[in-house]
Image (cartoon, rainbow, N blue to C red):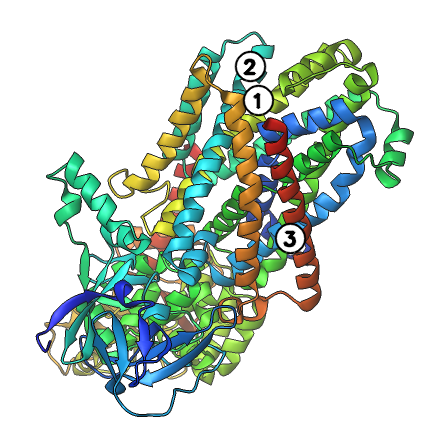
């Protein structure tokens, strides 16, 4: 087997193997980002505004890469989670309130995920009283009884299901020339609903839990500083794939529902409305995508939240511990799933209001976290040579500025609209 | 006010600091701690902060300050302290290095996060008495103690919360500060604390820490403990740790661990770092390791250690006994002695059991096993395992193509590989 040994010693092969072993956190985080809230926002964006919001995916991708790259760099340079770093450098008060806010906002997000599971299964005629408890149990067992490696593999595999959105998008037969034109030379319409939708896309794509989750999972992998480039590659791949998937979701709805002038209000409506134009299969693919995305996020969000809160508060955490060793961790994790799944099953629960409030919460929390991050990443005492370069800082602060401006606009608009 | 009493560090934070005339000069920010061998470390100075947007800090010696009620007062008529905008440089500060940071709880052998520090005040001196890791300290820091206490007392009058104090004596806590500073506590105090924890558990604790904390904890161990802890650490942790250590420290460590483990470890390092360490090592051990690194990991050459006990063919039993006695500190296998000729060619194997009751004058070669059992450097692990099992040997010699003795493989070296193999298969079945 000389040739096999030759391949095994080839630098490209060694690099590939190294990358495969490091790959995961970035790609998983970015893909969970296209969760129930995301799919809803993207399909409504397409259904209400056609191709006219396509341009926004380009700056969003850049911002996402910049924010997530900083987290990855902090993980590798310090070996600590984001909540740990905030606690150690800003003290207990900011940490506590930040964690409280994160917990509440993410609880709202988890409800949205279970609502997504219920909606997608209803397309196949499966009752939510059956699908929701079963998925909740599955998700709980996967995390509590599985090893981290197993969980990560299951999630990486689940990422493949996002291809279903790409297929749905192509099946919708968009006018490719028009798609390209609108992406490169957009005609921006500065009406109020348009801006709200724009801000909504930004808000769902760059969500606060992502920074905590990605940083912790890179720390958990224990990547050496020399291999940082591999981590960055993983993060960049993830942060590019996620908006591409989002783009296709928007396109599927734009090419069909918007063209036909049908009014839809939820992701389920959108999935069902696809059928007459792109066939039953497109609806099914869309529903499967929504189901996988929601389930995926319903597992990750409670996990990431419990980790962050326990890190920040100094409680023992980890899926490989026993319940008595980490009661707060398992309590939080189980509690979030039970509450998240439970509320979806309560008849007449104001679910839409809760989801809406949690999205506003996402928007308020994000700039706060970004500012903490930028202060940490520029502290040479913490980061050593991994601090931001001047150019990177300029781009990062610009991103933060735009995100803050947009989220402030979103919050203001949402309150205004709602009131 | 000269009676000793306890107080919480968090309740001192942000108290006003006034000079002798009663003018406010700033607020209390931190204690700088003295680095002597006190078991209960003493504060050597206070750090005062002023300004809100442009924060400035100044360090004052503790002798010039008294705590009077709810404020610190300067006693001397000294000129105002020199404020500067950067952080005050001091080796060890309570807020910076202990509060909200992780420490090792030596008694319970785990890593905990400090919610508050319990100070003992004796004659205007502040000593660290305990670190508080309890939930109540957390609530106190948030400023909700009165409200939460009242609520709990109302709802659950018998709750543990009201009485349970989760304090760890300072004597039993080891600080882990950021890696940019050297270890902050005097070494003998730290060593005495950490001596309570068995090396295996220390290695596990290391797994819970980030790389800087690992280096800090590791440096505070005695060298022989370092060797044991290092051997028990996971491969990833080892690599992370070596990166944080100074070259001298790393080289010392690698040249003192058994050569087969050193080789396994070196190969897991980035290439550049591996060659760097090899260059710095003493030529002899470096040459051995270089040779080991040339073999496949699962061949006899890759498994073997190059440390072993050997004697010339003319040696007597008395020489063998002396050899064993003289190597009691030697980390490898003491049971087996190989006999070689002038040139280093392998002649036979003997064990303590075979010569311990023999007359001292008898040539040790006569006590050798009747058969010569050995493996070659390129033999596979299976062959080594089979031979060890077949002859019930604890160790087997490794020869090169010219019958020269180059190393020795012990049962545990093979076991390690076999367990990994078996565990891999077991995991695949899951």
3 and 1 marks in contact (CB < 8 Å): no
Image quarter hosting the N terminus of chain B: bottom left
- Quadrant in the picture for the C terminus of chain B: top left
Q: Residue at x 72, y 16 (%)?
A: A282
Residue B238: x %, y % from top left:
42, 64
User: In the image, residue B169 lies at what x, y percent?
Assistant: 17, 65
Q: Residue furthest top?
A: A125
Residue, x 48% and y 62% (percent of image)?
Answer: A78
- Cα–Cα gap, marks 2 and 3: 38 Å
Q: Earlier in the sequence, mark 3 or mark 1?
A: 1
Circle 2 marks a residue in which chain?
A: A
Q: CA distance from mark 3 to mark 1?
A: 32 Å
Mark 2 or mark 1, which has the lower sequence index?
2
**Helix, strand or loop status at disc 1:** helix
The subunit letter for the residue under badge 1 reads: A
Q: Is residue B421 left or right of residue A275?
A: left
Could you confirm whether marks 2 and 3 are on the same chain? Answer: yes
A393 shown above or below B282: above
Report x, y in % for residue A288.
61, 20
- In the rendered image, which residue does mark 2 sit on? A121
Depth check: give the residue in front, B152 or A302.
Answer: B152
Crowding near the residue tagged with mark 3, few <14, some 14–19, many ≥20 C-alpha atoms within 10 Å: many
Q: Report if residue B308 is visible in the image.
A: no
The chain identifier of the residue carrying mark 3 reads A
Please tell me the numbered disc located at residue A400: 3
Horizontal relation, residue A282 to residue B49: left or right = right
Q: Is residue A245 above or below residue B196?
A: above
Q: Residue A168 or A160: which is nearer the viewer? A: A168
Locate residue A235, reporting x and y percent: 62, 48
The reply to whether callout 2 and callout 3 are in contact (CB within 8 Å) is no
Q: Earlier in the sequence, mark 2 or mark 3?
A: 2
The residue under label 1 is A291
């Amino acid at each position: 087997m000389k040739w096999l040994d030759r391949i095994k010693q080839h630098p490209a092969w060694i690099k590939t193997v190294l990358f495969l072993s490091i790959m995961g956190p970035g790609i998983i985080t970015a893909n969970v980002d296209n969760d129930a809230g995301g799919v809803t926002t993207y399909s409504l964006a397409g259904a209400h505004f056609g191709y006219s919001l396509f341009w926004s995916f380009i700056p969003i991708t850049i911002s996402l890469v910049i924010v997530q790259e900083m987290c990855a760099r902090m993980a590798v340079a310090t070996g600590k989670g984001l909540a740990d770093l905030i606690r150690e450098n800003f003290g207990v008060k900011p940490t506590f309130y930040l964690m409280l806010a994160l917990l509440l906002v993410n609880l709202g997000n988890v409800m949205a995920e279970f609502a997504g599971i219920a909606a997608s299964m209803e397309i196949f005629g499966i009752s939510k009283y059956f699908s929701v408890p079963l998925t909740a149990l599955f998700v709980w067992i996967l995390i509590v009884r599985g090893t981290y490696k197993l969980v990560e593999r299951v999630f990486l595999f689940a990422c493949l299901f996002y291809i279903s959105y790409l297929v749905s998008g192509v099946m919708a037969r968009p006018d490719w020339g028009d798609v390209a034109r609108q992406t490169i030379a957009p005609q921006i319409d500065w009406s109020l609903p348009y801006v709200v939708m724009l801000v909504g896309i930004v808000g769902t794509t760059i969500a606060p839990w992502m920074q905590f989750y990605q940083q912790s999972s890179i720390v958990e992998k224990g990547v050496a500083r020399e291999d940082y480039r591999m981590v960055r590659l993983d993060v960049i791949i993830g942060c590019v794939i996620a908006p591409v998937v989002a783009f296709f979701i928007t396109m599927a709805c734009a090419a069909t529902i918007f063209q036909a002038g049908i009014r839809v209000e939820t992701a389920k409506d959108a999935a069902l409305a696809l059928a007459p134009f792109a066939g039953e299969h497109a609806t099914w693919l869309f529903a499967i995508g929504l189901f996988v995305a929601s389930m995926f996020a319903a597992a990750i969000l409670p996990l990431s939240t419990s980790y962050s809160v326990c890190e920040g508060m100094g409680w023992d955490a980890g899926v490989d511990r026993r319940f008595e060793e980490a009661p707060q961790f398992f309590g939080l994790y189980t509690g979030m799933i039970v509450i998240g799944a439970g509320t979806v099953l309560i008849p007449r629960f104001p679910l839409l209001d809760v989801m809406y409030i949690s999205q506003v919460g996402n928007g308020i929390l994000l700039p706060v976290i970004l500012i903490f991050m930028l202060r940490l990443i520029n502290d040479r005492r913490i980061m050593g040579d991994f601090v931001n370069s001047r150019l990177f800082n300029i781009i990062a602060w610009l991103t933060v500025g735009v995100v803050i401006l947009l989220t402030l606009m979103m919050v203001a608009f949402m309150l205004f609209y709602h009131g | 006010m000269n009676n000793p009493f306890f107080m919480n560090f968090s309740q001192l934070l942000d108290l006003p600091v006034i000079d002798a005339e009663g003018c406010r000069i700033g607020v209390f920010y931190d204690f700088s701690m003295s680095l002597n061998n006190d078991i209960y470390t003493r504060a050597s100075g206070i750090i005062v902060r002023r300004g809100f947007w442009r924060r400035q800090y100044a360090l004052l010696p503790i002798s010039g300050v008294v705590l009077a009620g709810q404020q610190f007062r300067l006693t001397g008529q000294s000129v105002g302290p020199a404020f500067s905008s950067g952080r005050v440089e001091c080796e060890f500060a309570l807020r910076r290095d202990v509060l909200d940071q992780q420490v090792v709880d030596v008694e319970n052998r785990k890593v905990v996060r400090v919610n508050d520090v319990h100070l003992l005040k004796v004659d205007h001196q502040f000593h660290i008495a305990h670190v508080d890791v309890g939930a109540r300290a957390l609530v106190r820091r948030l400023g909700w103690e009165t409200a939460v206490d009242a609520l709990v007392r109302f709802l659950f009058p018998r709750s543990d919360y009201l009485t349970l104090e989760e304090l760890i004596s300072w004597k039993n806590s080891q600080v882990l500060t950021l890696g940019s500073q050297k270890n902050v506590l005097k070494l003998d105090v730290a060593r005495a604390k950490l001596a309570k924890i068995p090396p295996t558990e220390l290695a596990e604790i290391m797994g819970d820490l980030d790389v800087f904390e690992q280096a800090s904890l590791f440096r505070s161990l005695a060298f022989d403990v370092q060797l044991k802890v290092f051997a028990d650490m996971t491969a990833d942790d080892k690599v992370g740790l070596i990166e944080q250590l100074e070259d001298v420290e790393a080289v010392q460590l690698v040249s003192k661990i058994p050569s087969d483990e050193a080789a396994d470890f070196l190969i897991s390092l980035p290439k550049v770092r591996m060659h760097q360490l090899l260059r710095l090592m003493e030529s002899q051990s470096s040459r051995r390791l270089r040779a080991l690194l040339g073999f496949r990991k699962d061949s006899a050459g890759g498994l073997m250690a190059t440390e072993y006990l050997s004697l010339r063919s003319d040696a007597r039993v008395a020489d063998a006994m002396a050899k064993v006695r003289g190597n009691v500190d030697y980390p490898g296998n003491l049971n087996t002695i190989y006999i070689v000729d002038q040139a280093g060619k392998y002649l036979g194997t003997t064990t303590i059991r075979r010569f311990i009751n023999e007359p001292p004058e008898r040539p040790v070669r006569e006590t050798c096993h009747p058969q010569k059992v050995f493996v070659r450097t390129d033999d596979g692990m299976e062959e080594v395992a089979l031979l060890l099992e077949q002859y019930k040997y604890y160790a087997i010699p490794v020869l090169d193509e010219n019958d020269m003795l180059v190393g020795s493989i012990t049962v545990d070296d093979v076991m390690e590989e076999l367990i990994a193999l078996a565990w891999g298969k077991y995991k695949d079945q899951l």
